[in-house]
Image (cartoon, grey):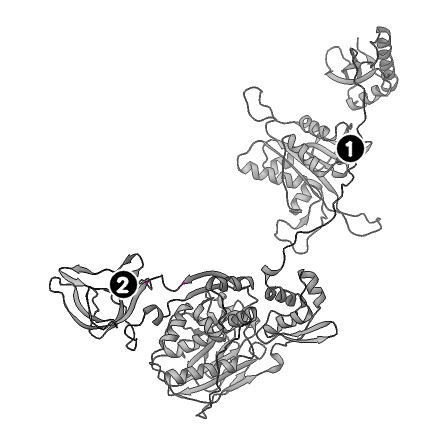
Amino acid sequence: MQFSEQWLRSLVNPPLDSEALGHLLTMAGLEVEESAPVAPPFTGVVVARIVEAEKHPNADKLKLCKVDAGQGDLLQIVCGAPNAAVGMKVPCAVVGAKLPGFEIKAAKLRGVESFGMLCSARELGLSEDHGGLMDLPADAPVGMNLREYLVLDDTLFTIKLTPNRSDCLSLLGVGREVAALTGQPLSAPQIAVVAPTLDDRRAIVLDAPAACPRYCGRIVRGVDAKAPTPDWMKQRLQRCGVRSISALVDVTNYVMLELGQPLHAFDNAHLSGAIHVRYPREGEQVLLLNEQTVTPAADTLLIADESRALALAGIMGGEESGITLETTDMFLESAFFAPDAIAGRARSYGFVSDASHRFERGVDFELAVSAIERATQLILEICGGAAGPVVEAVSKEHLPARKPVRLRPARARRLLGIDPDDAAIVKLLNGVHLGVRHEGDDLLVVPPSFRFDIEIEEDLIEEIARLYGYDNIPALPPQGGLAMLDRSESGRTAWDVRHQLAGRDYQEVVNYAFVEEAWERDFCANDAPIRLANPIASQMSVMRSSLIPGLTGNLVANRKRQLSRVRVFEIGRCFERKADGEPVVGFHQPVRVAGLATGPALPEQWGVPTRNVDFYDVKGDVEALFAPRVLKFEPVSEPALHPGRAAAVLLDGRRIGVVGELHPVWVQRYDLGTAPVVFELDMDAVLLADLPAYSEISRQPAVTRDLALVVEQALPVARVIEVLNESVPAIVKGVELFDVYHGKGIDPGKKSLAFRVLMQDTQRTLEDAEVDAAVTAIVHHAETVLGARLRG
């Protein structure tokens, strides 16, 4: 909303400059989006009258004018404006005047002296009109400073109101706020009741009382629609961004800006019978003032007479019944429309009006009669005529109820962090016309009819903060006692896990917990996923039970952007139904960490041959995540993973996750190219860590022995190493596999596993006998438990 500072100061004039006033409004919740002067700075410009205007002796397009600028003697000024004429009153910049961009000096133009300049609106920075001199009214006092005469020392404020503050869509509403915030008196417009001098009236019928519980109207006859709008009213309308149309229309716009009540004027000669406020009939159409013909929807309220629809109620009037310069008798309308009956209707027809903007936010439901009296008063002063009585139709049971709201001052003080006493709170609320009464330790506050935003206690607490001043509320940093918390060495944080995976060249992603139902069916074989009652999108209708589908979706997005090497991980919550036998019905919500890798194992470079990442690369990443704890891997069958290229991850005999290559079916279905390798682990297992234990570093030389064992082809290497470690003496520090062989020299169904055994003592050099004994013990145990034999 845009308005003139001078108009506001005519209602309330606080001892603040324009900048301070703008800051005050902003801090009160009426954000000043822009403030700009009405005119650029200039000096030395006065009202002048052209006494003589003759052709310049040496130029066809120039005139030699004698001008009365109120200085006693006439000024000789050379002027090139085509509209310069005798008797015309115009702005005159005398010698020494400073205009935007230049200063006026005495000069010779084509051999004739000129002592000043007659100005156009563009030369003064008042508008872009440069077609001629600015024509001032005939009653403009000669010699008066133009800035003073046109009230140019004014500022235009544009405030950005939140939808709940519809009471400030008027100068009176903003004035109430400024008066309450500064303690200055409010000079509200004096609204006199216009005594009717006619008995003419038009009946009003409320066919939709819930949508329009109050409608007022009066007939005014004998008006002069061609009467000029007063300059002061034109000026105020213009500075509020409203174009002057005609005196009758200007009055309705002026009252709307002044009081906040939209009005509409009908040509009474074009009305037939009673006025009805009703919903449209089938096929009914209205030609609006913007020349748009609309077929109102069934929920659009209409103003109609006995024969036809006249206007869209609270939105826009109709062209066929509107005011023209030939109107002599008018019917003036002032009403209250329920916000729900107006909200969104104008936008559905492709436009927004000032009236709909106000009605859909809420207009004072007690203002209709006062506004029609104010408008009648101005119409009679400007256009003459005689007024009939105000006819009012009201459905009181449908008017908004002003229920008292309970406020606990102690709670307000606690929430706001300020300490005004009860009396100060009552004074603040009374300042904005909120009726307050005590009830024990609480306050009961009754909102006035123009405050639709006061409904609950929190609204009142916000009001106290706003009136007290947001910038007066101390910004105290939170205080609290900090203590060094114990951090167990047997655990680590999720951030440690993130850093470790990032160090393995993975990048973290965060996906929605809502996924496509097809993902759950494909990757998790889940035909009964947890469905959302109100999904945010059709492709996000169920809760995920695994992180792997989301990572696959990330891979699909990267593939579409021609990225071949992708390594991503996610830490997030999954959602699983509880089993029927569990005591509490609901869902498990385990936190898991999952990763995906595909494409080249290393970024492309000249020093290492390019190869694709495989199962063992990702298996190594998983083992590094748990080091120094030892994991076991067992073959597993999972819906998402390739049979034979997937393993269950076990820690201390408990399954904690899976690792493997994505199933070829899903690789083809989702157009992934090469198959990615994925893992998914329980986060609680990942966060565990072994307590660090001291181990003496030996200074003695180590001894290594290699041995090759022939075992069954199906026997996992992990089982062989487990058995070997069961029998090793204390001097054995490690057993590692370094070769696998099957083929010539090895029986069918068998394989040869070559191990390197590292032996060392911390105190002495080992002897050959004890080294040989240790190797013999290892081989014997493998033969006994696994049926292995030493390869010859």
Q: Which residues are magenta?
A: 37-42
Number of the label disc, if any, that sits on residue 130: 2
Residue 351 is left or right of residue 624, and the answer is left
Q: Is residue 44 magenta?
A: no
For discs 2 and 1, the disc positioned in front in the rendered view: 2
Quadrant including the C terminus: top right
Quarter of image, res 661: top right
Characterize the local packing of mark 1: few (<14), some (14-19) or many (20 or more) Cα atoms within 10 angstroms: some
Instruction: Report the residue marked by disc 1.
Output: 689
Quarter of image, res 268: bottom left
Q: Residue furthest left?
A: 57
- Amino acid type shown at disc 2: His
Residue 709 is left or right of residue 597, and the answer is right
Q: Nearer the viewer, residue 660 or 472?
A: 472
Q: Is residue 40 magenta?
A: yes
Locate residue 222, reporting x and y percent: 37, 88
Residue at 82% in and 49% down:
580
Locate residue 667, reporting x and y percent: 62, 35
Residue at 30% in and 56% down:
101
- Amino acid type shown at disc 1: Ala
| Mark 1 residue element | loop
Q: Residue furthest front?
A: 72
User: Does residue 101 appear in this view?
Assistant: yes
| Mark 2 residue element | loop
Q: Residue furthest top?
A: 768
Characterize the local packing of mark 2: few (<14), some (14-19) or many (20 or more) Cα atoms within 10 angstroms: few
Q: Nearer the viewer, residue 405 or 280?
A: 405
